[in-house]
Amino acid sequence: QVQLVESGGGFVQAGGSLRLSCVVSGRIFSFNAMGWYRQAPGKQRELVAFMSIGGSTNYVDSYVDSVKGRFTISRDNAKNTVYLQMNSLKPEDTAVYFCYADGTYNPPGDSGRKPFNSWGQGTQVTVSS
């Protein structure tokens, strides 16, 4: 009922750039937070960038130290879309990237609001040296 679909992953050489997009669909009433995580082979999923949301205001809370100054999280409020601009990519950025969102939505056939927290299916980013 709330779906997140990522796109924009791919193969890039070190020093290159990619922009990931994540579209959130469903009868969304409000967002509390959106973010990007990644998981490399044999490693645990880690937070990359996180954004708290209050109405139409976005508060960029944190980036993992390894991406500070290179990655930027942003949001298009009207399109329910969150982006991750990744510049100066390094081989160690290679991972599957997942977007995350939580907030409230209106279930079909229900006039009330319920909380949701949802993940996308992931998009592969591969950076060659």
Image: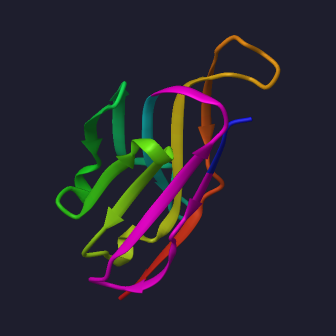
Q: Is residue 28 magenta?
A: yes
Task: Using the image as rendered, state which of residue 121 and residue 28 is in the foreground.
Answer: 28
Residue 71's spot in the image, x, y percent?
28, 60
Q: In the image, is residue 122 above or below residue 100? A: below
41 left or right, relative to 59 = right
Residue 2 point in image, percent of width and height: 68, 37
Q: In the figure, 12 relative to 69: above or below? A: below
- Residue 47 placement, left or right of 40: left
How many labels were placed on the picture? 0
The residue nearer to you, when weighing 77 against 34, is 77
Q: Percent from the top left, x then y, of residue 74? A: 33, 50
Check the image and name the residue furthest to the top: 112
Residue under the point 52% across and 54% down:
22
Q: Quadrant of the C terminus?
A: bottom left
- Quadrant hosting residue 128: bottom left
Left or right: residue 45 versus residue 65 is right
Instruction: Tell me where the magenta segment starts and ends, as one range.
Output: 5-31
Residue at screen point 20% across, 56% down: 68
Task: Report x, y in % for residue 86.
Answer: 32, 67
2 w.r.t. 98: above or below: above
**Quadrant in the picture for residue 15:** bottom left
Determine whether, in the image, residue 108 is placed left or right of residue 121.
right
Give the main secondary structure of the magenta stretch.
Answer: strand
State the quadrant of the N terminus.
Answer: top right
Q: Residue furthest right?
A: 109
